[in-house]
Amino acid sequence: MFRSGKPLCTTLSRRFGAVDGVAVANKHKICTQETTVNDKFKFPARLGTGEKSVWVEYIQLVADTKPAVNLGQGYPDFHAPEHIRKALSKIAISENPLTHQYTRGFGHPKLVQNLSKLYSPLVCRNINPLNEILVTVGGYEAIYCAILGHVEAGDEVIVIEPFFDCYEFMIRSAGGVPRFIPLKLKKTCGTVTSADWILDEKELASMFNCRTKIIIVNNPHNPTGKVFTCKELMFIANLCEKHNVLCLADEVYEWVVYPPNEHIRMATLPDMWERTITVGSAGKTFSVTGWKIGWAYGNSKIMRHLQIIHQNCVYTCCTPIQEAIAQALDIELAQRTTPKFYMEALAKELKPKRDFMVKTLTEVGFYPTIADAGYFIIADWRNLARRIDLSTEKDKYKDYRFTKKFSKECGVMTIPPSAFYSPQHKHLGENFARFCFIKKDDRLSLAAKLMKEWSVKRK
Ligand SMILES: Cc1ncc(COP(=O)(O)O)c(C=O)c1O
């Protein structure tokens, strides 16, 4: 560890074979002063200041404070389908040693074949499994490869707020400039649904210019649950065409859509295949977020750029997990038109959970947005403000103070949505808390009981 000058010198003197650490330091112009070492090894300025991550902070908070129910991070607390877990366990003890060795860098052959079979009919074209699909470490790495593979210094990337927080870092690390546009909640009374979060068309059009390289469209949207309509997508697509811009379609929640809403893939709109990179996630699709396998698909010329980034920073993803997902897809493709098809069954399973949470939150005094998709509800907590003393919490943003105090008082942890806004728009997220409802019924019932008890006590 190079925490002070002395160990640094000692280490270097050993390395360079000198007896006297100071002599070595002088010879190699290495300063032994702690400040200089710190300056030299500081975080690269082009990557920003190393902002705190809401995930790191809140996962630690959960570990430290052990709330009774954690509705913060977005993962299921119930099992994935049995067939996918069994596939992995069989692969783990398989007689074939190669299932434990490196596989094809751009995606395990059986997995890319099956992804092609899954998506080709959905995008109305034959997707070439070898050059139009890239398997990545979660949807996360697919987004990274898409951004790093296209953004030049000074290029602008349009980001719709609230946004998955890593987008900003990835854009800046590529030398790009994020341009933020917030969805605006147009309704302030009555029932609010995800569709009430509106993208201002005029404002969006005004952001496109000759420096715009990419627009990121997270659809269905986390955390509002918005499912972009055909009209909204067409508007974005037309701007992309007019200004020759790529669309990075983050569609990791593609299967979790509540009827009558329907997910429309950006890549299927006229002329958009040529300029759309679509991101998917096995973690979200099969309720195995810890497996961290995702993918991107799109036109081969564009996908080549993602492949180059991937081959130089990850090279190849975990073979047994790719094989297990491929085998799970064999089963899902065979039962695609039956009620067993997991991707559709999951949304059916989640809808009563969503309804339960909306009802509970309303009864407690929150003002929730009914999610049209995904497994999050953002709920306005302003009605509860007079019942909770936030002055004991020191965070800058109100939603951080609210979520922390609420968790301490009632034992239910949530996530502060201002984390998903740029500094200039954080105020737009401050009145909300994000609740994840992809949890077992007994967990949701416990959360409801605790929140109702809290509400009665704080009347
Ligand atoms: C909007 C969005 N995009 C991408 C991801 C990353 O997906 P994965 O877990 O497959 O990396 C997430 C995960 O929460 C997400 O919410």
Image (tube, rainbow, N blue to C red):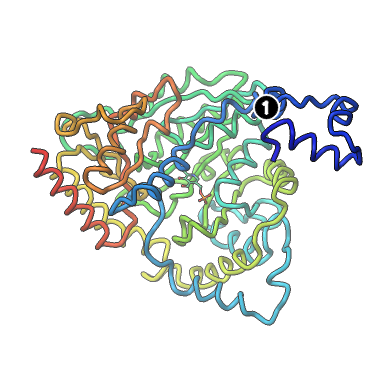
Camera-side residue of 163 and 393: 393
Query: Residue flagged by tag 1: what amino acid is it?
Result: Asn
Residue 117, quarter of the rendered image: bottom right
266 relative position to 128: left or right: left
Residue at the spot 80% in from the left edge and 38% down from the top edge: 10
Above or below: residue 295 compared with residue 211: below
Residue at the spot 90% in from the left edge and 27% down from the top edge: 27
Above or below: residue 134 compared with residue 9: below
42 relative position to 138: left or right: right
The residue furthest bottom is 95
Residue 18 in the image: state x and y as whole percent. Answer: 91, 38
Is any part of residue 243 visible from this angle? no
The quadrant of the picture occupied by the N terminus is top right
Residue holding disc 1? 38
The quadrant of the picture occupied by the C terminus is top left
Camera-side residue of 353 and 50: 50
Is any part of residue 3 visible from this angle? yes
262 relative position to 307: left or right: left
Residue 382, quarter of the rendered image: top left
Residue 447 in the image: state x and y as whole percent. Answer: 23, 53
Mark 1 burial class by Cα count in 10 Å: few <14, some 14-19, many 20+: some
Residue 329 in the image: state x and y as whole percent. Answer: 53, 67
- Tell me the element at label 1: helix
